[in-house]
Image (spheres, rainbow, N blue to C red):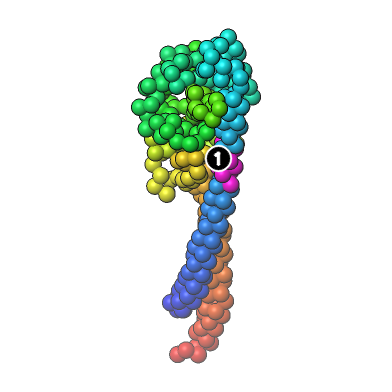
């Protein structure tokens, strides 16, 4: 007899509780995921900024080694007086230093060329002068420059052929005698060494690092599309030109966010089940006494 009343009470209580739970969980999920994203973004940015700082400091240390070597008497005498017996030793010392320089090449402005052990098929200075960025440096007053190069490189590093598309970071220093430039010293670091030893970020899976300048781009892996939904992208200044670019996959964030949502959905299910139980209980509390009263009145013929 009171079935319709039972349904009205149950539906009113249940759907009110259901709407409240859904609204509260949606708001909670949004806040939690936003905070999780902000923390993930902040920690990732801090990590890659530290890696970029380490990269710039590392290249600055290489440049300092090269600048010291460029002013040694062995190199200046070789370029001005032809005393070349100690050039190889200085260049080899440079690549054997703790700076991880892979190859060193010394050019005289008159066309002389010297290079360290393991380097081969070295391009002539005239070939380097065709490179716009190098040509600008040669004509400038800058004592040194840190440049990304993918053109006019030695074909051999570490006694094996080297693919120029992989790039090298060259710390190029001018060799001075009495204030005049008599040559150029190139200290080359392979891009793989930079990515593996300096720009790697511990604990960050799916991270791709790249060096991007106006003349070249090299990366540790295939750079994914940076659409903002699948990857976070950070650009941090590199040396005197260009940027370090870090592209970090959001897969880990989505995995953590999915786990958070799963917990929220599980709590929602428990709350909705509890709401259904309470609504059913309240509806029964109201309608069952009425049913009993009606039954009593029928038994006593009070309804006739």
Does residue 196 appear in this view? no
Q: Residue furthest front?
A: 178
Give the percent coordinates (x, y) of residue 291. 52, 79
Work out whether residue 45 or residue 118 is closer to the camera in this orientation and state it: 118
Give the percent coordinates (x, y) of residue 210. 46, 36
Q: Secondary structure at mark 1?
A: helix
Q: Is residue 54 shown above or below 166?
A: below
Taking 126 as reference, is 198 left or right? right
Identified at 59% across, 25% down, the residue is: 71
Identified at 43% across, 45% down, the residue is: 230
Identified at 50% across, 15% down, the residue is: 114
Per the image, the residue denoted by label 1 is 52
Q: Is residue 122 magenta?
A: no
Work out whether residue 177 or residue 151 is closer to the camera in this orientation and state it: 177
Work out whether residue 182 or residue 229 is closer to the camera in this orientation and state it: 182
Identified at 61% across, 19% down, the residue is: 73
In the image, the segment drawn in magenta is: 46-55
Q: Main secondary structure of the magenta part?
A: helix
């Amino acid at each position: 007899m009171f079935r319709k009343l039972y349904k009205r009470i149950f539906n009113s209580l249940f759907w009110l509780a259901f709407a409240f739970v859904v609204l509260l969980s949606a708001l909670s999920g949004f806040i939690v995921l936003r905070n999780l994203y902000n923390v993930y973004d902040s920690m990732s940015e801090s990590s890659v900024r530290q890696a970029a700082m380490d990269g710039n400091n590392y290249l600055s240390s290489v440049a300092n080694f090269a600048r010291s070597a460029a002013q040694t008497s062995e190199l200046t005498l070789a370029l001005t007086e032809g005393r070349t017996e100690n050039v190889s030793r200085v260049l080899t010392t440079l690549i054997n230093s703790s700076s991880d320089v892979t190859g060193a090449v010394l050019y005289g402005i008159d066309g002389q060329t010297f290079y360290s052990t393991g380097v081969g098929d070295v391009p002539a200075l005239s070939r380097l002068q065709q490179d716009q960025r190098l040509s600008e440096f040669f004509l400038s007053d800058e004592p040194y420059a840190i440049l990304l190069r993918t053109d006019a490189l030695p074909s051999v590093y570490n006694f094996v052929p080297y693919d120029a598309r992989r790039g090298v970071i060259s710390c190029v220093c001018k060799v001075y005698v009495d204030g005049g430039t008599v040559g150029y010293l190139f200290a080359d670091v392979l891009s793989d060494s930079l990515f593996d030893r300096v720009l790697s970020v511990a604990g960050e899976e799916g991270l791709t690092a790249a060096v991007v300048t106006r003349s070249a781009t090299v990366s540790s892996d295939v750079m994914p599309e940076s659409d903002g939904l699948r990857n976070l992208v950070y650009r941090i200044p590199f040396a005197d030109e260009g940027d370090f670019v870090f592209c970090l996959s959001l897969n880990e964030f989505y995995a953590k966010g999915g786990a958070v949502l799963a917990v929220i959905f599980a709590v929602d299910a428990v709350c909705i089940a509890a709401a259904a139980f309470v609504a059913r209980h309240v509806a029964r509390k109201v309608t069952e006494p009425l049913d009993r009263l009606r039954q009593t009145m029928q038994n006593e013929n009070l309804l006739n």
